[in-house]
Image (cartoon, rainbow, N blue to C red):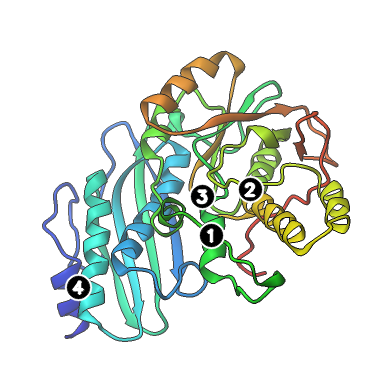
Amino acid sequence: MTEFELIARYFTRPNRSALLGNGDDCAIVAPSAGNAFAVTTDTLIEGRHFLPTLDPFKLGRRVVNVNFSDLAAMGALPRYALLSLTLPQIDEDRISRFSDGLWSALDAYGVELIGGNTTKGPLAIAMTVFGELPPNAALTRSGARAGDELWVSGTLGDAGWALTSLIRDRSSDGGFAIEATAAQIEKYESPNARVALGLALRGIATSCIDISDGLLSEAKHLATASAVSIEIDIEAIPSGIEAIDRSDKWSAAQRLNAATNVAERDALIVAQLAQHCLLSTGDAYELLFTAPHDQHDAIAEILKRENLPGACIGRVTTLDAANPVRVLDAQSRAMDIEVKGWDHFA
């Protein structure tokens, strides 16, 4: 099978709204009247952004939703996509399942694939997506104000917990296993972009970002862009992980040193790992956003309507340059937790 046969068989459909789609050197598209395009791109590399064992159908869906999550964070409606594939070889069975997953996700949003590229090399998948929105309706990172509430659209830590369970060397740290549920593994392998929520938050949220690199990292982005500080109540963060240590790491260290047996020590280590997944691991693809206090009930109703287990998890405060993001325990005491997240070059 040649490159062009592959594109024609698996990645070409008739145009619906594109002025000129797949098949020429460029596609030609235009936003609906009164709208502008929001454009983003992301690259997924095997072994870095997904495991080699991932079902190609789920990979196809993941590629789409990871990119649409950025559009959701801007309050943009997805319209068009470009796909670039780097393949070590043409495996028709895997390509067929990948394209089925890709189309299922694109079709769910009514999005057209209007072009792209294929080449040979280590497996990598890049997608560029176009969303549209009224220019003055865009959600950005820079509008949070002191007094706003901080919200998250769904559970956090589950994807990081699932990844840990999939890759962890069970002979390390005493040899105990990290067990993730099927739902947690599905959340990691095949996330869903919160597009409908992003659209509903237009005119309500004052700032917004998607959680791809970890809660604390994304909260810092909001704080920095808005020139404010953010406080997060660790007890309020929704998660599907049961054994999370929501206490300060120093008290946890003291308890670890005081452990009287291996089982107790292992349980404390697992609880601390769960806390790390809650606060610092990525791949959640939930929305983190701020909104005025008087919008509390409206946001709660939107989350209920979208069947999302989100919650208000903190607040925006005036800028404290030394502490742009603080995590508070159940007694509202600042916890000694490093604000960091996923780093592509770490």
Q: Residues within 10 Å of mark 2 (few under 14, many from 20)?
A: some
Res 112 visible: no
Q: Is residue 109 above or below residue 190?
A: above
Residue 86 lies, in percent from the top left, at 36, 78
x%, y% of residue 104?
Answer: 23, 54
The answer to whether any part of residue 326 appears in the image is yes
As shown in the figure, which amino acid type bears the numbered disc 4?
A: Ile
> Which residue is depicted at the point 57% across and 13% down?
294
Of the residues under marks 3 and 2, which one precedes in the sequence? 2
Among the 4 quarters of the image, the one containing residue 223: top right
Q: Residues within 10 Å of mark 4 (few under 14, many from 20)?
A: some
- Give residue 118's mark: none
User: Mark 2: which amino acid?
Assistant: Ala
- Answer whether labels 1 and 2 touch (C-beta < 8 Å): no
Instruction: Indicate the position of residue 72 as horizontal and vertical percent values.
Output: 42, 41
Chain-order first, disc 4 or disc 1? 4
Q: Give the structural element (helix, strand or loop) at label 4.
A: helix
Please report whichever mark, 1 or 3, sits nearer to the chain's N-terminal start: 1
Whole-Å distance between the Cαs marked 3 and 2?
A: 18 Å
| Residue type indicated by callout 1 | Glu
Amino acid type assigned to the residue bearing label 3 in the image: Ala
Front residue of 136/289: it is 289
Is residue 201 shown left or right of residue 6?
Answer: right
Disc 1 from disc 2: Cα separation: 11 Å
The reply, left or right, for residue 279 in relation to residue 268 is left
* The N terminus sits in image quarter: bottom left
